[in-house]
Image (cartoon, grey):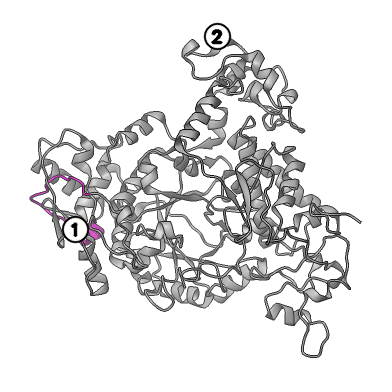
Amino acid sequence: MTESSSGTAMEPIAEDAQHLIPSNSAGGQPSPEELVAKAIAPVKREFLRPPPLRPCSSVAKTDGVLGTQFDSSSNKLVKEKKSKRQLKRERREERKSALNLCPEIAKSGDFSSCPYGEKCRFSHDLEAYKDQKPADLEGVCPFTSSMKRCPYGLACRFSGTHKDGIPMESLDGQKEISEVNGLKKDVQKLLWKSRMKFPIADATLKVLGHVVKGRLKTRSVEDKAEDGHSIVNRSNDLAEIDCKKDDDFSNNVECCSEVVVEENIDGASAAGENRPLKKVKRVEGHKCSSDEVLNAGTSVLEKCFENSEADSPNESYELPETDASLKLHPREKKLIDFSRKLYLAPLTTVGNLPCRRVCKLLGADVTCGEMAMCTNLLQGQASEWALLRRHSSEDVFGVQICGAYPDLVARAVELIDQECSVDFIDINMGCPIDIVVNKGAGSALLTKPLRMKNVIQSASMTAEKPITIKVRTGYFEGRNRIDSSIADIGLWGASAITVHGRSRQQRYSKLADWDYIYQCAKKAPNVLQVLGNGDVFSFLDWNKHMSDCPELSSCMIARGALIKPWIFTEIKEQRHWDISSSERLDILKDYVRFGLEHWGSDSKVETTRHFLLEWLSYTCRYIPVGLLDVIPQRLNWRPPSYCGRDDLETLMASDSAADWIRISEILLGKVPAGFTFAPKHKSNAYDSAENG
């Protein structure tokens, strides 16, 4: 008999587990078919066990960590909030710590290697660092195992396994070769100071008519055209903007298309999220329509660009380094053929670069980075730009961005087009998160067809890479459905669209509506590829969707890849893989190795641990094939408490964060003192939907 971290026996106890399964009308045990009808996983009786004991909710308990306690009312860990002054003091003390060793000295062990000398903000006390450095972790440095010199040197938590004889020259550019799309420092400084120039995006916005003789179109103009009713605004339909010249380029080229406050979807005023009024240049003379541009291509854009220069000889736009005449016509763009490609969906938090590398090893064809907000990208936030990084193994790779306004999206697209190596750019128009929707982005765009059109047109006319979009069926059930616009989306410039078979109101509850996805695919024009998304969890699901609707190009796989990343292997090999616990552990080892290479093998080891735990909060929902009476497993099944065929499989099936930490300790050693973890995302498909 073995025990879990909560002290509960983990051997098969079929008799004691009978109360876990609801009885049928005859008083006996329900059949597997009856369990499936109730969305309960039909686990074989010999593997059932009583649920593990949980802490009593009537008593508030501390977890032994300073500043953290257990909230009995909500069963959540509540962390004490620290003031800004306290956080600043902690950062200052951290800089003074001997553990904050200079990276150059840690890399070479030579004090003279630091170019800043005494002015360096890091510690140069090598002996004090060695005395205070935590003990090395078990295992081998991921860089040494790859016959590379570790870029972290003495700071590496696996420094005892480093090998001599690898020249220092191999350090420079070592990570850059395998990972691209990093934010350059000079570009970041321009973004910080709002001095980055976007000539193509600004000329495109002018061509589309978002700036008309010094006036900016307001949201109310679009809203009235779309919905037939007015929305409360703080200004008139057209906001007069002062068009005085300014030496600062940021004031000259800011040309946002909507600047007026409106009430948000939920009825609450989004005053805190309002876009400030921007100064724009007065545009007079020739005006080009969007229809003219779509019919004539890039030449019209160049003509309008030249006319704008003739009208304002003292105001100059800088063309990009390449010749503007070489800019591709939308029909000449290199399109991505998604036909029957295994597409890993962009997944927030858990769809990071190491996870995508694991999925590539297991058979994924197309990968896409995590969703990045256009505003944060244009502000030069390094954390947001990290979401765009690409590994050399990702042969077909795209990035996903999210923005509410054509000017934001167009400039972000131009910036990504120039600074990043990507194969396509995906625009998220289906994100259901409140903080995104309240800003008018994500699925809020589904209620604004005219704004959606402006966003897609401005992005496709600005970018040289193909533009794809991801949407939901609608905002509310039966209203503003995407099928009414799908015939036009291809004409607006999108090369592919992914339809998630749920509305924003559903979030992730209920099953995806694939019949509606088929309906959209049949209505789409030939120039627009349609991909389906929702509840693909086995090769049978994939085969069914592809055979039921030949017009469907492919299926995007999201949560199914998080719960069992080997789904790509199953689809390619057309089999149910009864994967063992040791094989699953090998996949986690690959993830840890990729994580240490990506985030770092020094103090950033805990970053790898954190994202590993986030992923384990999904993988615990997998039920091995050999334990089920009915296969394959469905994504909406609620698993009963069960034990695996060995101790490791039982541990991996636990939904307790304490057991996830135990798995991380197998791979990354003991957690530091006072370590706690609470998953960021709800991984259960059967959670009750919010907002209706």
**Residue 67: horizontal and vertical position, in percent?**
60, 42
Q: Nearer the viewer, residue 159 or 357?
A: 159
Q: Looking at the image, is 600 positioned above or below residue 347? A: above
Q: Amino acid at mark 2?
A: Ser
Question: Which residue is disc 2 drawn over?
Answer: 112
Callout 1: few (<14), some (14-19), or many (20+) C-alpha neighbours within 10 Å?
A: many
Where in the figure is residue 445, as x and y percent of width and height?
A: 36, 63
Q: Is residue 469 visible?
A: no
Find the magenta span and give its range: 277-296
Q: Is residue 40 visible?
A: yes
Residue bearing mark 1: 217
Give the number of marks.
Answer: 2
Describe the element under mark 1 as helix, strand or loop. strand
The answer to if 287 sits in the magenta stretch is: yes
Q: Determine whether the residue tagged by mark 2 lies in a helix, strand or loop.
A: helix
Mark earlier in primary sequence (1, 2)? 2
**Is residue 651 found inside the magenta-colored segment of the image?**
no
As drawn, 401 above or below 429: above
